Image (tube, rainbow, N blue to C red):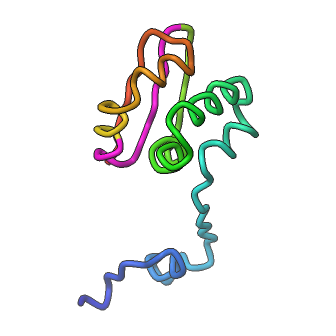
Amino acid sequence: MRKDFQVPDEHDEMAAMPADRQSSRVVTEFFTPLLARVEKESAEILPALLKLKKLIGDDDFDLYINTLQNIRRNETTVLLITDKALHKTNIEARFMAKIEEAFGVEFVRVVSTG
């Protein structure tokens, strides 16, 4: 391995910084489940999320919905953003009708960043 190139893990962020910049502060922010973020930031969609949790079950909700990077809703559409293409595929195959029902929308769009 090259001495000038290191891949840090979440406990070793400073290793990736050049020596002249190591006084800079690097912060790791751990992932917060979607439900906890919605309670603080977007309480207006909380009832729909709780309804969806009842419709699809706790295990599937925790695996596919609570791990979403973001969720947005307007009058007709819900946008779900996930970091896993496999989760996008499973959400589209298994939960579209239930998401439409829970949120009272006509369209659901799922986007994957990974």
The x and y percentages for residue 57 are 53, 41
User: Quadrant where the N terminus lies?
Assistant: bottom left
Q: Position of residue 45 (x, y in %)?
A: 66, 25
User: Left or right of 51: which side holds 8?
Assistant: left
Residue 98: image x %, image y %? 47, 24
On whether residue 81 falls in the magenta region, the answer is: yes
Q: Residue furthest left?
A: 1
Where, by quadrant of the figure, is residue 85 drawn?
top left
The magenta span reads: 76-87
Whether 55 is drawn above or below 87: the answer is above
Q: Is residue 37 above or below residue 93?
A: below
Q: Is residue 8 above or below residue 56?
A: below
**67 left or right, relative to 35:** left
The residue shown at (62%, 28%) is 51
Residue situated in front as seen by the camera: 90 or 67: 90
Percent position (x, y) of residue 54? Answer: 59, 34
